[in-house]
Amino acid sequence: MPDDRRPARQVHDERVDLPTSSTEELHTGYVMDLVAESVSLGAGGTVRREFVRHPGAVAVVALDDAERVALLRQYRHPVRAHLWEVPAGLLDVPGEPLQHAAARELTEEADLRAATWHTLVDFFTTPGGSDERIRIFLARDLSVVPEADRYQREAEEIGMELAWVPLADAVAAALAGRIHNPSTVTGVLAAQAARDGGWSALRPADTPWQPAWHRD
């Protein structure tokens, strides 16, 4: 049984820079690179770790007045599947604020604009093998981009199907294993939790990523 007399510990991630003796770029890719580093773990000795260096990304849970979320059906070749996804994209414009990148992706992928933005949740996609980080925004008060102003899509984005799915149904699909995209699963579960809390836990849209790190 837990000892209820102990004060509850606040759980938070902590940034730590361990001594790195070497860094080697094994492959330079179009979007991401594969690197190897030798890092000292103290009592654990020095180990070599290979990981993918990634620019990061943003994603958007776009929620309409009926509490339906916009999902896009897109082909993803590495997993050989069409996945239902929230609008998302790379942080590939140097210096672009996270919210601006998210608004751009929402417009380009879903032909939508939003008047109200909040930070919903931040996460690392694969911290054991990549430094990719994603911020998911909650976008509300939506409007449709006029036909003449719409972005001309290409490659996998051509012909993407847009579906408006009740938030509760999207959550059920995630829990049942019917949808698998990490930003979608994380985003809809976080949106449901935020909604159940009366949206009081939402952070401002311009919240920097860095202050989320803590040091003891």
Image (tube, helix red, strand yellow):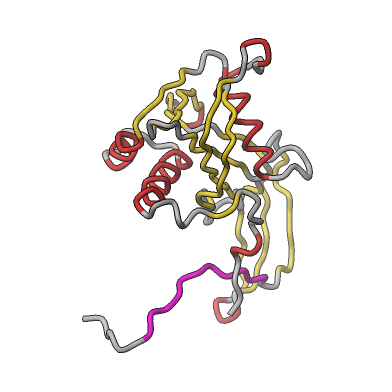
Whole-percent x, y for residue 22 in the image: 74, 63
Q: Is residue 195 left or right of residue 2?
A: right
51 or 24: which is nearer to us? Answer: 51
Residue drawn at (65%, 16%) of the image: 150
Residue sticking out furthest to the top: 148
Q: Is residue 80 magenta?
A: no
Looking at the picture, does residue 12 appear above or below residue 160?
below
Q: Give the range drawn in magenta.
A: 7-17
Is residue 96 toward the left or the right of residue 206 in the image? Answer: right
Query: Would you say 157 lies left or right of 187 here?
Result: right
Measuring from the top left, give residue 187's x and y in whole percent: 45, 43
**Image quarter hosting the N terminus:** bottom left
Of residue 152 and residue 70, the one placed in the foreground of this image is 70
- Main SS of the magenta segment? loop
Question: At 42% from the left edge and 45% from the top edge, which residue is drawn?
Answer: 191
Q: Which residue is drawn at 67% across and 10% down?
A: 148
Report the label total.
0
Q: Residue at image x 55%, y 39%?
A: 59
